[in-house]
Image (spheres, helix red, strand yellow):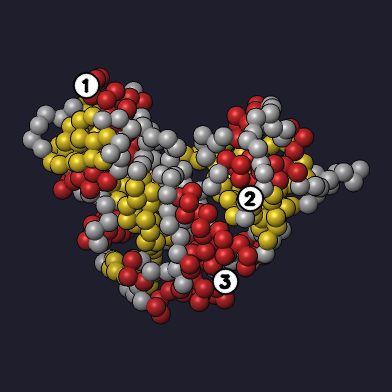
Amino acid sequence: MTIEIRTITSDELLEFTTTMARTFGRDFNPEYLERRRETFEFDRNLGAFDDGEVVGTSGIFTYEMTVPGGTLPTAGVTMVTVRSDHRRQGILTGMMAAQLDQVAARGEPMAALWASESVIYGRFGYGLAADTCEFKIDRTRTAMEHAPETPGKVRMVSADQARETWPTIWDRVRLEQPGMMTRSPGWWRQRVFFDPPEWRAGFSGAAYANYEADGEVRGYIKYRMKPDGDARGLPTGTIRIDEMMAATGDAYAALWQYAFSIDLVDTIEAPLRRPDEPLYWMLADPRRLKRTPHDSLWLRIVDVERCLSARSYAVDGRVVFEVSDPFRPGNAGRYALEGGPGGAKCVKTNEQGEVRLDIADLGAVYLGGAKLQTLVHTGRVSGERAALRRADAMLAWTPGPWCPEVF
């Protein structure tokens, strides 16, 4: 059997998408094919073909990701599947290798993904760079004891009105938040505001609201309701917050207060929230906020020198990393990093390595999420104690990494 791995043509999009959806256990509605073309990048999507038939899929969304102190071009890896009758034949490895070759050729220094199965991507050099949390709280336990003044007001808006203002708020938050990405106009149309009934999981259509103060929009919320009631007719519905972005502290407090005040519900859910969310510290009874953490953003460093040179560091310092990379051996080597709050420079060196780690672990610590001294206890990282402390102090960053959208 010979497997051909190549970019797909426009005529192959339906078969590609149908194969991907079925492998994920879903159906694809062909009526959405033309919408899909708006965000689909044909020159970046690879199919694995067996005798002309699609048996594997992988794709990339092109965007800029925020890193501590800056942004970098990033390949957003997505749509990775291998058909069930073609597993264990090296197809995934072949697609991952071809994809990373393409990323490097385009000059993108890193790739990122959300893993459908977390055991897969470490062997290709991806490290877990950010966690996220699912929040759940009883509406009767949402009293706030500590919150800034909220001089503005929350106002419900239409989807068309939201489209006018939300991209500006997203970008204000994104530029300060490592792990967030740019959104194209097509992404806003097809991924944020497209709302077919079969995607709602039993909830209502999306509702939209802005927080406005002093004549400007400072934040927004997108949410859904699932009405329900008990045998006595008492409401037991649920609010699910799909997205909440606040550019200021008063917007953050006001939007949560608004969500907590909606009638006919007794539970508020919010997936994909920050692990270091301020809400926990604002509640009168923070124990009532149930927080379920899980992995989110996985990062693959493709160009070590460029990535380490591009971000800022919390304190001035110098450290020599010795990096291994079995999947892309050209990345392996020793790298001298010198940097601080004002910028950094990283170059290959013949100096003795002070911190030894795999490329996946470098991805895990790059945005300031994981700590080298934590990974030492797993046997994944080794080095001089003073160098590990110095490197962790440099790599630390506030706010911590957060990616609020699955792609």
- Considering only vertical position in the picture, is 160 above or below 166? below
Secondary structure of the residue carrying numbered label 1: loop
Residue located 72% across and 53% down the image: 225
Residue located 34% across and 50% down the image: 71
Q: Badge 3 local density, few (<14 within 10 Å), some, or many (20+)?
A: few
Which residue is disc 2 drawn over?
Answer: 213
- Give how far apart the Cα atoms at labels 1 and 3 are: 56 Å
Task: Residue type at mark 3: give it.
Answer: Asn
- Taking the view exactly as shown, the residue that stands out farthest to the top is 385
Q: Badge 2 local density, few (<14 within 10 Å), some, or many (20+)?
A: some
| Res. 51 image quadrant | bottom left
Secondary structure of the residue carrying numbered label 3: loop
Which residue is disc 1 drawn over?
Answer: 384
Task: Residue type at mark 2: give it.
Answer: Ala
Looking at marks 2 and 3 on the same chain, the residue that comes earlier in the sequence is marked by 3
Q: Out of 238 and 259, give the one closest to the viewer.
A: 259
